[in-house]
Image (cartoon, rainbow, N blue to C red):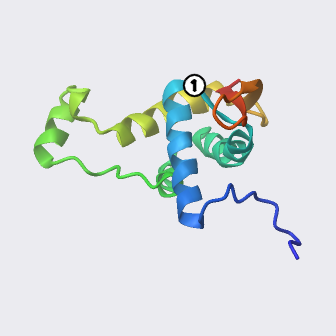
Amino acid sequence: MRHRKNKTKLNRTTEHKKALMRNLSKELIQKGTISTTKAKAKELQKVFEPLVTLAKEDTLHARRQVISKLGLHYNSLTPKQARAAKAGDTSMYNIDRVVIDKLFKEIGPRYKERAGGYTRVVLSSRRVGDGAETCFIECV
């Protein structure tokens, strides 16, 4: 029986699904809108919206929680790269730092007054290969 099992499996193992949701969340933070299947988009909403809620307040604890949930490697710069980054050279930043900075400096403050519902799923056509329903998920 599947009592109180409210999450879809997406035909993947737990580790694979977790990695998929982390990657889709990072892409959504970076690009603002992504195209995926309807089932993945509905699951992504459940993962992404708590991240935005945490990003509303830029505290150390909230940053560490988001880093933990997204599985980021935030401190992977060498000391030389870190000194260059402090001096203003952001080309040394790894993509994880860019994701965290964008989430806490742009996306979080944008939804400061909003109580929830930060994403929108817009249905589009069916995929040619297997006929899966595709859609766009975007930040409102």
Question: In the picture, residue 121 is in which quadrant?
Answer: top right
Q: Is residue 65 above or below residue 87?
A: below
Q: Which percent across, then down, holds residue 37?
A: 68, 37
Q: Can residue 103 be seen here?
A: yes
Q: Residue at x 19, y 41 (%)?
A: 82
Q: Is residue 49 above or below residue 137?
A: below
Q: Residues within 10 Å of mark 1 (few under 14, many from 20)?
A: some
Residue type at numbered disc 1: Gly
Q: Secondary structure at mark 1?
A: loop
| Screen quadrant of the C terminus | top right
Tell which of 126 and 14 is nearer to you.
Answer: 126
Q: Which percent across, then down, holds residue 12?
A: 61, 60
Q: Is residue 73 left or right of residue 39?
A: left
Direction bottom: furthest residue: 1
Q: Which residue is mark 1?
A: 32
Q: Is residue 19 left or right of residue 37?
A: left
Q: Residue at x 77, y 26 (%)?
A: 123
Q: Is residue 124 left or right of residue 92?
A: right
Q: Residue at x 62, y 38 (%)?
A: 56
Q: Which percent across, then down, holds residue 81?
A: 15, 40
Q: Can residue 62 be seen here?
A: no
